Structure formats: C-alpha cells, structure tokens
Amino acid sequence: MTVRLKITLLMTAAGFVASLVFSCIILWEMVEQPFRLIDSDLKAAGPRVARAVMAGEGDEAGPGVPDGDHYWLEVRDPATGEVFFRSGLARTYRIDPPSAGRGRTVSAVAGGQDAAGRDKEREKVDFRVYTAAFSWDGKQYLASAGRPVEHLEDELGDTISGIAGGLAFSVLVLAAISYFLAGLMLRPIRELNAQARDISEKHLDRRMPVTGEHDEFNTLAETLNTVFDRLQHAFLRQKRLLADASHELKTPLTMMRLALDAIRSDAGGGTPDPQAESHERMTEQVLRMDRLVKSLLDLSSLEIEAVAVREPLDLAAILGALVEDYRFLGEARGIELRADLPDRLDMAGNADKLTRTFSNLLDNAVKYNVEGGSVSVTGALSGPDLIVTLANTGPGVPDEDLPRIFEQFYRVEKSRSQQHGGSGLGLAIVKRIVELHGGAITFENRPEGLTTVTVTLPRHGRGPAAPRPA
C-alpha cells in the first residue's frame, strides 16, 4: 500500500468519524427539537382551553372552544382524580396522562362500537401528551393536552434516511479530496525521489533544491545534501588516492625496468647468462605493470575531471588518420580496414582524448578479429550529434558479458591471458572520455556476425557540469 493511499484512508477515516459524531449531534437535536416545541405548545394550550371550558364557553365535547377540536384534552381534579372534561379525541382515544410538568409520547388505540353494536376497527395512534397545572376559581386543576405525532415520526424517519445518505456521499467526496490533498502533500517527496535517482557516481555534484520554507521536506533535502556532500568528498578522496598511488608506483617501476635493461645489456657481451630467460620474463612483467599503472593513472585523472577542455576539430580527419595507421597492423593478419566518412565532421571536443578513444577501439577491433576479417569505420551527422560506428568480424562478446563490458578490470577473456596485452581498463577509459564530452557509447552483437561499437557525440559542447567543492 502506497503512502498516498495510507494518508487518504487515514484522512477519510478521521473525517468520517468527525462527520458521524456531528451528524449524531444534529440528529439528536432534530429529533428532540420538535417534541420540545410541541411540549411548549401543549403546556400553554392545555390550561388555556381548560379555562375556556370551565368558563362555559363550550359544551363538554368542546365545540365552540377555541382549538378544542384539535387537541386531545382532559381536565381533572388532582386530589380526587375526577375528570371534569374530555374532548372528542380524548373520548375516542383513552390515554393515561403523565404527571404534571412532564411530556411523553404514548400510543393509544381507538375504541367504541358502530351503529350495529360491533367493535370498530381498532386504530393505533401515537400522541404527544403534556400535563400542566392551572388554577380556577381558587382551586387547582390538571389539564392534559395532546396532539397526534404520526406525521412527525414519518418526517423524522425521512430525515434520518437523508442524513445517512448524505453521510455516505460525504465520505466518498472526502475520500476523493483526501486523495488529491495527499498527492499535493507528497509532491515534494516525489520531486526529491526523482532528483535522488539522477544522482549517481558520475553526478555526485547534483543536490536537492532547498527553499526558504521551514518544513520537514526542506529539512530532509538539507540532510540528503549533507549526505551527498560527504559521499562526494569520499569518492574524490578515493580517486585522488588511486591517482597518487599510481603516480608513486611509476618511479619504482621505472627504476626496476632500467635495472633489468642494464642486467640484460651486461649479459649480452658474448658470455651466456643462465639467468637471461628469467630476466626476460621479469622485464615483461615489469612492462606489463608499467602499462597498468599508466592506465590507472589516466583513468583516475579522467575520473577527477568534470568536463573535457573543448576546441573546434574535424573528427573525420582524426578517424581517417587512425584508420591509415592501423591499416598496416591489419594487413599483417590479412584484415581489411575500410572507412566511410564524410569530408568533414566538425565538432567541439578534445582532440587528444578523442584520438585515444578511437585508437583504443580500433586496436581492439584489430586484435580481437579473425584472420582475413575486416574492420569498418563509418561516421555521419544526425541532427545535433555525430555518430561513429566501428564494426569488426571478431568472435563477438557473449550476451551475458555485454552489461559489464565497460567496467574497470573486466575482461571477456576470463583467463586474463597476456596474449593481447590487455588490462581491462581500455574500454573504461573510452567510456569516461565519451561521457566527459556529453556523449554515449553502446556495444552490440549483430545477427550478420559483426560486433559493433556505436559512439554518439554532440557537435556543440554538451557535457557534465563541474562538481561542487567538497
């Protein structure tokens, strides 16, 4: 369940409980208020009509008495219980009146017989009856007055149904509003999440936006920015450590190589040296370590750089020169090199770094090829970009290795043989140079048996921004 849905359910539940309590209070008031009004009316009407009857303004049935036919009315002596007057409704419906000063709802059943002496059909009616004391001619009497409340109860039932329906509808509206408000509340979280996804090892300089508001979201953004500052600082320290270590290793390796060269030169004076073969192997290993350290130093330097220094250049000229240089290496193995390039491929970039990039790719295309194979280099304009494709007829790369082909020290050749002299850093350096130019590189195996590398470079300097200071 998402946080937005949880907030929606919580807000809806809280609103429902509040609405339910409010509805119960309103319903209670709506149920009680009509009875209070009726009791107030009966409290005043009972004694008034009773006095009129006692004054002889109507007969005992009440005709001529103002409102006498509209009330259930009974006048009695509180001491003896003798009834002095009953209205027509009181004669039809016999009710046990409440005590003085009280009102209550009672059910009464009509009685009597018809002209043939048979019992009339019994009819049940609910009355609201109130008993009030009054004095007449110096003596106290009780007047009980009542009115039918069937229609009032029906109206109250309709009111309860209406409130229940309104409450159900309000819950639906509240759920919709809560879902919308939850989305607004969580919008900063979604923005922080999207920006956090863009922050990677290559873009640790990016930070969360912080506004001037003092809320939890800005506090979270500031905390994340602090974490990213520390992380960026740690990465920079790691890269500098790698660069410094590589730089420090260059000197002893150079001294070892010179010492081995000197030993081999001394042994070449005509006297066979039984350790010459060992010296040769040691020299090869030192040279391999020297190349590895140089590659590590180059890669660490590229990792520290944020942007490539750009200048106008013709990429077609660079590619053409590289193809001519590697043509001789290919001819030794019967490998044909072809170039399909336009007259010019103008762009803004670093000539030295791009030369190293495509030299490395051409070197791999020739080394990892088959006897009598071919290598083709094509270049073309595509809107604001340049696209260069290198294809060779080599054995290809297994599909499971494609996602890791540009990782540092990763080699498709698991035995790490020295046959081709690779260290597993060449393609990592190529990828970093392309990224510094704001481009992209992909590697794929085509069905026709070609292994292709596609490099996309922007013609006009689009690249990563400089990092923030740690």
Image: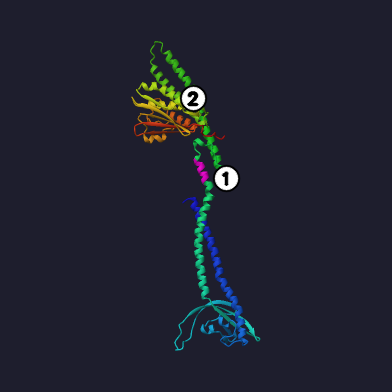
Q: x, y (%) of residue 402?
A: 39, 34
| Relative vertical location of residue 136 with respect to residue 157 in this rendering, above or below | below
Foreground: 252 or 337? Answer: 337
| Relative vertical location of residue 447 with respect to residue 60 in this rendering, above or below | above
Question: Between disc 2 and disc 1, whose residue precedes?
Answer: 1
| Relative vertical location of residue 136 with respect to residue 103 in this rendering, above or below | below
2 vs 1, front mark: 1
Magenta stretch: includes residue 29: no
- Report the amino acid beneath label 1: Thr
* Res 431 label: none
Say which residue appears at 56% left-offset and 74% top-offset. 35
Give the SS element for disc 1: helix
Say which residue appears at 53% left-offset and 76% top-offset. 149
Return the residue at label 2. Answer: 249
Q: Which residues are magenta?
A: 190-197
Q: Quadrant of residue 330?
A: top left
- Report the amino acid beneath label 2: Leu
Q: x, y (%) of residue 59?
A: 58, 88
Q: x, y (%) of residue 32?
A: 56, 71
| Relative vertical location of residue 293 with respect to residue 203 in this rendering, above or below | above
Give the SS element for disc 2: helix
Q: x, y (%) of residue 137?
A: 65, 87
Q: Is residue 430 visible?
A: yes
Q: Which residue is most to the right? A: 138
Q: Quadrant of residue 340?
A: top left
Label 2 environment density (alpha carbons within 10 Å; few <14, some 14–19, many ≥20): some
Return the residue at label 1. Answer: 219
Provide the major secondary structure of the magenta segment. helix
